[in-house]
Image (spheres, rainbow, N blue to C red):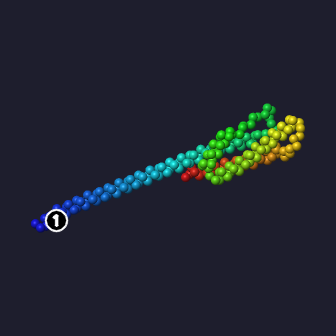
Amino acid sequence: MAYEWVGTVATAVVGVVGIVGTWLSSKQGRDSTERLTREGFEHEHRLAREARQQQRLADSYVKLLGMVERTGQWAQTVKPIMDTIPPQPVRPLPELEEQAEVEAFVNAFASDDVRAALETWLCIVRDVIAAVGLIDLEAQDAQKARPSGVDYESPYMKLHELRPVERSARETLTRQVSRELRESATL
């Protein structure tokens, strides 16, 4: 009779060890599932954030390219040396509000390379605008039939020289934007 209690105790110990083992195993499974679920949500959140950033970048670049092309068309067609009869209307420059909006998007999302290419192109466009202004001043002086005493340094020639430079800078900017959009689409 001395050993009769050993079987009962052993069974109880094995039962308790089994219960504890099952509890530990299920806790580890729950913890593992919880961790994997949390990591999955974080990954999806990160992907969604990156997708939103890429979409904002793409939208910004499309707006930029639209403004750049309209401005480029203006620069290429304003003040032609020989005009048609009747003269063809010249598209106006983009409105200041549109320019400000596009510049804000570019400042927020564009890369340094795009900003540098944009700045180069903008400097050339400012020179085109200045040449057009000088052409207008020269025309006003000619209408008044009096010499102004101002040497305009042939603004038509300056405009003629600036047009291919503007086109080249615009194409460089466009290529840079296109390259970045293609690279971001492959990420």
In this view of the protein, which residue sits in the foreground, 143 or 62?
A: 143
Residue located at (68% from left, 44% from top):
68
Left of 75 or right of it: where is 146?
right
Q: Which residue is mark 1?
A: 6
Rendering coords of residue 95 (x, y %): 68, 39
Q: Position of residue 157 (x, y in %)?
A: 82, 45
Which quadrant is the N terminus positioned in?
bottom left
Q: Position of residue 79 (x, y in %)?
A: 79, 39
Q: Among all residues in the image, which is located at the extreme left?
A: 1
Residue type beneath disc 1: Val
Spot occupied by residue 87 in the image (x, y as percentages of width and height) = 78, 34
**Residue 148 located left or right of residue 116:** right
Front residue of 95 and 83: 95
Residue 158 seen anywhere in this rendered image of the structure: yes
**Among all residues in the image, which is located at the extreme bottom?**
2
Identity of the residue drawn at 76% across and 43% down: 129
